[in-house]
Image (cartoon, helix red, strand yellow):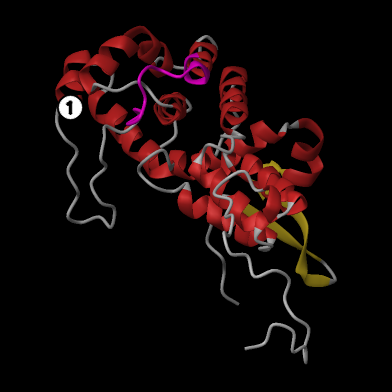
């Protein structure tokens, strides 16, 4: 019998059913005998991604980030995509897949977080490196399927000044005292914005927070996708209840509405 190779998960089968697990361990922790009773969702999420239990500071930081990202709101393109799926009668899975697809890109999406985290790894807390790097137009990696981003990752290409929720999130997360990246970002935000010619975006705050949590860019990209799904889900459900006539975007008013469809066999207004 072939084995499944994973460092994350270990199962022991029931003695009378090889297809059912009697015990499940995640990175050595008994999931149903220990974590279910003593761990929070955020602590378990950290364990899954990082392979170790979080410190109290790490748990608070991840929880704060999760709240900040949980619902980007209807203005966000990923949420808008899920709303379109909901109002159009798509399945729940289709609505979430639409949100993931639209929210995966390098302009306000998860790929932007990945790129911003790579910048943090390369530049660290060196302001001169940041200023030099932000002054250079991003270029495409010939070995990547992703096109060149149109703006410095982590900054808002359409912003005039840093949005209030971004400032509030940065201030709160930096004040939790987990790592040094967020604190440095808060201290040097205006200098970085001046070098980029753009205000800081929520993707930039998320990237800094994920670096302070010890995540690698690929992990941060995946977490960003995951943490934003609750808002997409509830807005899709709401629009499904409202119906297309109450959809808040791009309503179509026909100037020559043909009226209700004719029943089969009807000759009224036939040409």
User: Would you say 72 lies left or right of 185 here?
Assistant: right
**Image x and y of residue 265, in percent:** 78, 92
Q: Main secondary structure of the magenta part?
A: loop
Q: State yes or no: residue 134 in magenta.
A: no
Image vertical order of residue 77 relative to residue 117, above or below: below
The question of residue 162 being in magenta is answered with yes
- Left or right: where 19 falls relative to 168: right
- Give percent across and percent down for residue 61: 56, 22
- Which residue is at 61% across, 61% downward? 94
Whether residue 55 sits left or right of residue 131 in the image: it is right
Foreground of the two, 204 or 77: 77
Identify whether 205 is placed above or below 1. above
Q: Is residue 7 visible?
A: no
Which residues are drawn in magenta?
155-167
Q: Residue at x 34, y 27 (%)?
A: 155
User: From the image, which quarter does the N terminus lie in?
Assistant: bottom right
Question: Is 256 placed above or below 99 here?
Answer: below
Q: Quadrant of the C terminus?
A: bottom right
């Amino acid at each position: 019998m072939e084995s499944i190779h994973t460092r994350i998960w270990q199962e022991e089968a029931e003695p009378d059913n090889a297809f059912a697990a009697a015990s499940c361990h995640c990175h050595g922790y008994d999931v149903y005998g220990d974590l279910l009773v003593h761990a929070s969702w955020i602590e378990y999420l950290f364990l899954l991604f990082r392979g170790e239990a979080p410190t109290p500071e790490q748990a608070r930081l991840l929880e704060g980030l999760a709240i900040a990202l949980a619902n980007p709101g209807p203005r966000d393109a990923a949420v808008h995509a899920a709303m379109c799926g909901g109002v159009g009668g798509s399945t729940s899975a289709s609505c979430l897949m639409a949100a993931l697809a639209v929210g995966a890109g390098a302009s306000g999406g998860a790929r932007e977080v990945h790129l911003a985290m790579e910048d943090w790894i390369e530049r660290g807390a060196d302001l001169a490196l940041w200023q030099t790097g932000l002054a250079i137009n991003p270029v495409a990696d010939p070995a990547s399927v992703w096109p060149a981003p149109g703006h410095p990752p982590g900054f808002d290409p359409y912003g005039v000044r840093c949005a209030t929720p971004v400032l509030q999130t940065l201030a709160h997360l930096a004040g939790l005292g987990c790592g040094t990246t967020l604190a440095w970002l808060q201290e040097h935000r205006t200098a970085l914005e001046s070098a980029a010619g753009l205000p800081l975006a929520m993707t930039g705050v998320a990237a800094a927070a994920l670096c302070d949590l010890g995540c690698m860019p690929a992990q941060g990209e995946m977490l960003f996708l995951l943490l934003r799904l609750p808002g997409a889900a509830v807005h899709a459900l709401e629009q499904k209840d409202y119906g297309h006539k109450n959809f808040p975007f791009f309503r179509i008013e026909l100037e020559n509405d043909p009226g209700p469809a004719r029943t089969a066999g009807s000759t009224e207004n036939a040409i």
